Image (tube, grey):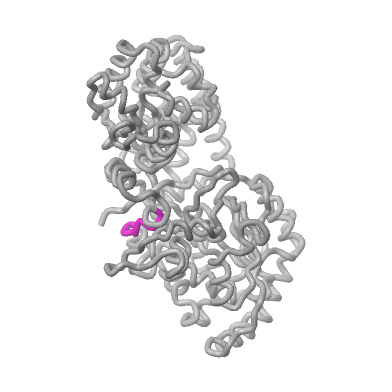
Amino acid sequence: MKANMKKIFSAAMCMLLVLATLAGCGSTANQTESTSTAAVEQTTAQTTVAEKPIVELSMMQFDISVDDVEGMKNDRIKKFIEEKFRIKLKIVNPGDTATYHEKLNLYLSSGEAPDIIDDGLEPNFTTNAQKEELLYDMGAAVARNPELYPVLNKLFADPMYKLTNQFKFGDSEKTFAIWSISQLVNPWAGGVVYNGKIVKELGLKLPTTVDEYVAMLREIKAKKPDVIPLGMRVDKGNLIGLLSPLFFRTYGVDILELTHDGKGSFTDTSTSDAAKQQWKLLQTLYKEGIIDKQVITNDTVAVVREKFINGKYATFVSNGPGYHGLAVGDLYNELIKVNPSAKIGVDIMADEAPLKGPAGVANLRLPIADVAATNTVIYGNSKYPDRALELLNYMLSNEGQDLKWFGIEGVHYTKNSDGTKKINRDEFFKDAQVYLPGETTRFEWTPFSDLTGQCYYQFESYPTIAEAANNTRNLIMESYLPAGEIGEYCNKVGIPFEDAVDLMPLYEFLSTGAMSDEQKAIKAKVEDLKKKYYAAFLVGQKDVDKEWVNFVTEVKAAGCDDYAKAFTEAVAKNKAIYDKFVK
């Protein structure tokens, strides 16, 4: 069964230098592990039937805006978990996410970190903390009592999980973290949303190719000169990559990412003649008044959303189809506020498949699974690591996943005769409602939102992680997103994009994170240089024909080809490791 894919979590990866401040805590953690683990686990085994004492477990979770006082005080899901496991769950809310890693570092250096820790997308935290012996060895504990933690026992034995251990720790048997291994979610695609009123008024048909789309834009400009044919959010060039799926990958090139040849080699095609011709096209469209003149200064979602829903844009280039990104679902929910009679699929429409070009479709190449982006660990000095393991084991089970996504049966949902769930939306949104500051919608129960990195699948139902990820249930669509006509339309226009995704193998995806700091610095330097040129190309500050040689010279001097060569070598090396674990 083909994978259902939703959105790759797009938060920025933050870097943290923890080695210096973590030094000195390792001996205490080691002592805790060596002297107390066996006794604790023996006690756990003896009390599985008898009533356990109530203990406090603390948990630090990235990107949550609710804590024990605000939002969580009377949360029924939290109370359900506490009663089921006889714990008092203390949610540690660091407040500003920008200081999350700094505060986590302070906790670790003080020797009093929370029991359960989410690493908050920091790529080096888990490996560095493990080197400093600050983490609890979950794998060893589970191996001693596998019957107590059946889901974790299955998880830790999985080939993909062992492979991730090998990449992260250099040892497939080291199990100090629950790696986020979720299915591919939401292809980052060049989806176009259309003002249905204008499409109908001009008698237009939705395009199927990029050439047809460009012709459509020019026809709109000629017949409705007061309307901007193409709008989008580029944010001073920071989001210039939104152009790549639609206008570049359809021509066989990519303006930011490397292009693979299908045989293991990677090249930087941003300096190719094909890329040059596409920049010339975009610069021409801008000069013709087809692209929003404020495309560079549109720096918030609200700005471009307002322009579209108020009829200033005829089309809108988004980063994803269907429900995904700032696309038809989001825009429709705003449109009906100003036009309550608006109908999805009529007054607002989206591409029903990714637009095609001579060398591809409007999708980015994405990993088959999102691995080790955000990870969960247990602190080495935790007083109750067995109870933390018990809780994590449950949350990864099918029952725990149902609780996370749907809530408590009989309260937040009821089961239909066919096993599907009917959400009681009034009750559903009462508990842990706010996900991020400024938002008012709930995707899942917030405190465990990053456990396995937005785990949309039920691992217990499948033999391996890969099969679970690729045969996922649409938990997010079942639990949160609007039902009825909106849901049906968004699925209709979203699934073809998912089906067309060019999936990269796991070893290629892991190679990106495994590049040296020097190579990562080269990549960042090259991208920064490209974005400055691209923004200038787009709005005509730099003539493409006159400046192309300078662009190519500077990008190559910054090391674009060196990075491509190093990445090709890394992929070959990591494929050899991959082949040993995943057949």
The residue lying at 31 percent from left, 49 percent from top is 484
Left or right? Give the position of 20 relative to 386: right
Instruction: Name the outermost residue toward the front.
Output: 341
Q: Please say if 420 is above or below 267.
A: below
Tell which of 445 and 430 is nearer to you: 430
Q: Which residues are magenta?
A: 470-476
Left or right? Give the position of 169 relative to 569: right
Q: Position of residue 183 (x, y in %)?
A: 39, 54
Tell which of 27 and 56 is nearer to you: 56
| Residue 279: in magenta span | no
The residue lying at 61 percent from left, 61 percent from top is 72
Q: Position of residue 334 (x, y in %)?
A: 44, 36
Q: Position of residue 191 (x, y in %)?
A: 35, 34
Q: Position of residue 292 (x, y in %)?
A: 44, 19
Residue 185 appears in the rendering:
yes
The residue lying at 34 percent from left, 59 percent from top is 473
Marks counted in the figure total 0
Q: Quadrant of the N terminus?
A: bottom left
